[in-house]
Image (cartoon, rainbow, N blue to C red):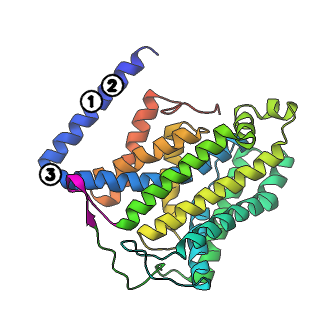
Amino acid sequence: MAWRPYAGALVSVAALAWLVGALRQSGADARLVLSLVAWGIMLGGIVGLGAIGLSLVYGVLRFGNFAHGDLMTVGAYAALAILPMLPQGPPLRPLSFGWEMIPALLLAMALTGLVSVAIDRILYRPLRRRRSSPVLVAMASLGAAFFLRSALYLGWGADFRFYYTGRARPSIALPLGIRLRPDQIFVMALAVVLVVLTYLLLTRTRLGKAMRATADNPVLARVSGIDTERIARWTWLIGGALAGAGGVMLGLDAQLRPEMGWALLLPMFAAAILGGIGNPYGALVGGLVMGVVQQVSTVVVNPAYAPGVALVVMIALLLLRPRGLLGGAAG
């Protein structure tokens, strides 16, 4: 509709004016706000990686995978299990971890991708072959989420865990008064690298082009000779690997707990929807928006309500742009 761009601009200006007024009223330090924006970009990168996997799965298989957050947790705990098996080196100062974290991250990504493929073979593929409804498949994914989380509780218990204990992680001062921990800068850089690699995969390889063709029109892709089951298998592998990377990155920034991925599931869905469900690039943009809004909103509201603030922003934007910021696959 013709009025939507103007309404969107008015709502954006009103929201910005409210945020500036609220920040001034709260007396927030500009350096604190800038640091929150930087933390939000880091959190948005983690959420975006998970949302890219969700969007890929939805685009190719047409259902929302409620187990995706717990796959992220599987990746985090996989790295926790792998680390003691590797030779331990000194910390790569100013980072808090040593070289052993790099192979642990790669192995955790591969393991999480294989777990995703295994879940598809055991649970989702039989349902696809029976032409079960997307709602039934989504409910099956909810059951898979509970199963994965229960397995983590049985294996590691409910206590918080850390990759390294007893290591100081002081923040460093950056220009404009921004303070970040070196591990957070590493997480942001890693998110950028993974997103660029995913972009190159989707745009420069035959596999990526086949995935995009399947996402655009699965029936036409099958008629054109594309092996859609192979594409589904790669989609699970890549989506699971990205979720595993997001879990390890989240574990590096905070502590590990069995609910860590489940707690991020709603922001990941919100980011995927905000960016345009089925659009992996939009999922990253949505993740960054959600991360920054959540972090900056903690200046004026209780941090416990931050996810709610981000969801309100998502709903407001979707009322104006129902297909998301960058559009997406038709439902």
- Is residue 237 visible in the rendered image? The answer is yes
For the point 23% across and 52% down, which residue is it? 33
- Distance between mark 3 and mark 2 Cα atoms: 25 Å
Helix, strand or loop for disc 1: helix
Viewer-proximal residue among 132 and 239: 239
Q: Is residue 102 found left or right of 292 in the rendered image?
A: right
In the drawing, what numbered circle is on residue 176? none
Which quadrant of the rendered structure holds the C terminus? top right
Instruction: Give how far across and how far down residue 300 sits, in percent.
Output: 22, 52
Viewer-proximal residue among 3 and 247: 247
Q: Which residue is mark 1?
A: 13
Circle 1/circle 3 CB separation < 8 Å: no
Circle nearer the N terminus (3, 2)? 2
> Please, which residue is most extreme toward the top here?
2
Q: Is residue 144 found left or right of 52 in the rendered image?
A: right
Q: Is residue 245 found left or right of 180 in the rendered image?
A: right
Magenta run includes residue 173 = yes
Name the amino acid, label 3: Ser
Q: Which residue is mark 2?
A: 9
Instruction: Give how far across and how far down residue 252 sits, in percent.
Output: 45, 70
**Highlighted range, magenta:** 172-181
For the point 39% across and 16% down, which residue is it? 3
Name the amino acid, label 2: Ala
Helix, strand or loop for disc 3: helix
Q: Which residue is mark 3?
A: 26
Circle 2/circle 1 CB separation < 8 Å: yes
Instruction: Give how far across and how far down residue 51 sits, in percent.
Output: 55, 49
Q: Is residue 287 above or below residue 154?
A: above
